[in-house]
Image (cartoon, grey):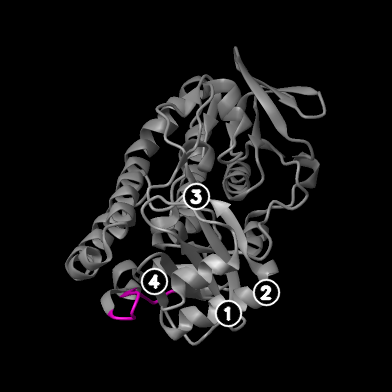
Amino acid sequence: MTDDSVLVAGGGIAGLAVARALRQRGIRTFVSERMADAASGGLSIMLPGNAIMAFAELGLRNRLERLGEAVHRREYRSGSGRLLFEVDEDAFWGPLAQPRVLRRSELLDLLDDKHEDNRRSSAVVSVRPVDGGAEATFDDGHVERHGFVIGADGVRSAVRQSVFGEHEARFAVLSAAAFRWIAPNPGVDSYVGWTGEGSFLLIPLDRGEVYVFASATGGAGFEATPEWLERTFGSFPEPVRAVVAYARNHPEALHHSPIEEIRINEWTRGRVALIGDAAHATSPMWAQGGALAVEDAVVMADTLARGDWDSAGQRYERRRRKRVDHVQLATDQFSAAASLPIEVRERTMPEVGPKAYRAAYGPLREKLT
């Protein structure tokens, strides 16, 4: 390769987004991804308004609006079903940043610009910064030199480990793990979250289905069985019980995984930079994983397009730190509030909840700098 090419390690949301943004700016770009399909099956993703604005920067707003379902309203309820507070998403974000929920596989297909000649079907296992670029070693043993390497390879990032040293992921403040699945819609017409012994979320999806997220609270873990769902949420209102019953009868639909976060003080070194979860994985409390990844991609590509790749990583990090730090702080604060004793949550959420929503998302309505 040459010193004017960029290697992107990872073909998920962050990797495909930055590859697209770089190619739009005329920068020769290669993507390495070992898995033939980086999508997580048919699982879904929530895209808040700031994610929609980032997709607009990629020229994908119109195509995105044909996928999934718009989220017009949020409701937060107690485990008994009492409304604690609600949010008008339409009024908050406006018509050009309407939040959406869609399948991850559809999102990855939207981002993929199909440059098959610029793909590497092996994974990057290590990266070494060198003068004027970086050398990447792949799992098949071959080595390539590029003018810049972007680590978009997720929480277990090989780029992060080889360049920045070992940084273990930490479990999220809210819960150490979560269940996710897709089920027939039991009749909800908005984003609805319930809080009690655990946290439970339903978001209407297209095709008469609903996206489901369930976790413990207080940083706890739990066994990966449908029985845990029944014990924890069996007394919740009917929409919850209906999708839990579906999970019991279709255990193959359940996806159980840890909720892990990455908090590190350095994202760049020489001509190597981390983006997305490799740099700052965070709990999905405010649904910012995919949003921050696409924002990173737009800013990273814009920074490289301005030239001086020796300083590009540092300039990218300076542009992104404040926004990411804000999201991580807002995530920790609301996760801690969701872990308070149930009676305290139910008493304080009607006042605290709307303020927390505005505080978390308000700065994210600002355009990327």
Residue 245 is labelled as 1
Nearer the observer: mark 1 or 4; the answer is 1
Considering every residue shown, the one lying at the far bottom of the view is 187
Q: Mark 3 highlights which residue? A: 259
> Whole-Å distance between the Cαs marked 1 and 4?
18 Å
Relative to 361, 19 lies left or right: right
Eyeballing the image, is 104 above or below 184? above
Q: Is residue 64 visible?
A: no
- 245 vs 193, nearest the viewer: 245
- 99 vs 335, nearest the viewer: 335
Residues at circles 1 and 4 in contact by the CB criterion of under 8 Å: no
Nearer the observer: mark 3 or 2; the answer is 2
Nearer the observer: mark 4 or 2; the answer is 2
Give the magenta part as a residue range: 70-82
Quadrant in the picture for the N terminus: top right
> Whole-Å distance between the Cαs marked 4 and 3?
18 Å
Residues at circles 3 and 1 in contact by the CB criterion of under 8 Å: no
User: What's the residue type where badge 3 is placed?
Assistant: Ile
Residues at circles 2 and 1 in contact by the CB criterion of under 8 Å: no
In primary-sequence order, the first of circles 1 and 4 is: 4
User: What's the residue type where badge 4 is placed?
Assistant: Gly
User: What's the residue type where badge 1 is placed?
Assistant: Ala
User: What's the residue type where badge 2 is placed?
Assistant: His
Image position, residue 277 (x, y; %): 52, 42
Residue 123 is labelled as none
Magenta-span inclusion, residue 43: no
In primary-sequence order, the first of circles 4 and 3 is: 4
In primary-sequence order, the first of circles 4 and 2 is: 4
Residue 250 is labelled as 2
Q: Mark 4 highlights which residue? A: 193
Image position, residue 67 (x, y; %): 58, 71
